[in-house]
Image: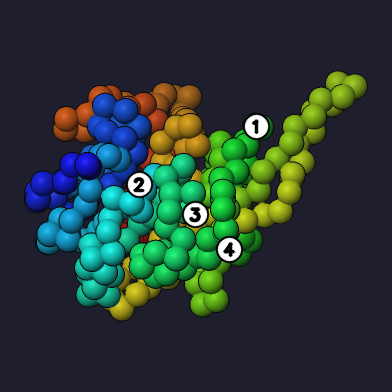
Amino acid sequence: MSKTASKKSGDILYCGDGDLTTAARFPAAIMTYYGLSFDHVPSNVEVTEDQFDGRKLVVLSDFPARLMDDRTQKALGKEIYGGVGLAVFGGWNSGSYGGWKDSLIGDLLPVEMLEGDDRLNSSQKAVVLKPEGKEHPIYEGIDWKRPPCVGGFNKFTAKPGSEVLLNVVDTITTYEKGNLSIKEYGPRYPFLVLSSYGKGNIGVVATDISPHWGGVDYEQRLSEGRLKITAEGAREAELGFGHAQFFGNVLKWTGRY
């Protein structure tokens, strides 16, 4: 039998990524860096509808659908319609593989999940691509001429009427006769897709915020090194400035900060 989360008081209800001594310390560090108050629900703890009281944003990151029953998902849908944001991030417990396809929350998302195993684990890194000429607050502070790379992602398609802000493509690197070559390997998939439901913003990111998929070292600065942040109750997390900037932007947009 799964445990049940206790009611707390942060603006954000953050669910998933293990616990604060493991992978969850990375998203917790980003929220701490940007001054976003949160309560964390570990990946083995069931969420109940009273956990949504007083929230601005709910984050589901590598969190399995089996820990949020239909009644709770329906309650979350009502909260989103009333103005609470929803940010969904990828991982092995996300997407179809995590049981979210055809769920009540899955039906609200701006993406169509694939049947079966939707995970793509990249052996040589997948690259995140910004469409030329497109502008959005989530892009701010990122050098898109040096795009981030990730170790994997959940494959999905964008639903009609949604907004695709970023795409992702797997790559293959070859070295022959002294020449290094990097080429696209396979189709491009949506990486960041946005929509709204009632008054609430919804954002879906195909990859994880934490290792092993998440590119936590993205844009570490030679002059400043990496960010070293310890959220309350968590182990210290080290991450690049660009990684914190991107995921912070997603959280602030979905939560209307």
Instruction: Give the SS element for disc 3.
Output: loop
Task: Looking at the picture, tell me which residue is in the foreground, 183 or 53.
Answer: 53
The amino acid pointed to by label 1 is: Ser
Instruction: Give the SS element for disc 1.
Output: strand
> Which comes sooner in the sequence, label 1 or label 3?
3
Give the class, few, some or many, for how many residues have Cα within 10 Å of label 3's Cα (few <14, many ≥20): many
Residue assigned mark 3: 96
Examine the image and state in which quarter residue 81 appears. Answer: bottom left
49 displayed left or right of 88: left
Instruction: Give the SS element for disc 4.
Output: strand
Separation of residues labelled 4 and 1 (CA atoms)? 22 Å
Q: Which colour scheme is used?
A: rainbow
Name the residue at the top extreme. 178
Separation of residues labelled 2 and 4 (CA atoms)? 20 Å
User: x, y percentage for residue 145?
Assistant: 61, 46
The amino acid pointed to by label 4 is: Thr
Name the residue rendered at 24%, 73% in the picture. Answer: 78
CB-based contact (under 8 Å), mark 1 and mark 3 = no
> Which comes sooner in the sequence, label 2 or label 4?
2
Instruction: Give the SS element for disc 2.
Output: loop
Residue assigned mark 4: 157
- Relative to 180, is 66 above or below? below
Residue assigned mark 2: 63
Badge number at residue 142? none
The amino acid pointed to by label 3 is: Ser
**Quadrant occupied by the N terminus:** top left
**Quadrant occupied by the C terminus:** bottom left
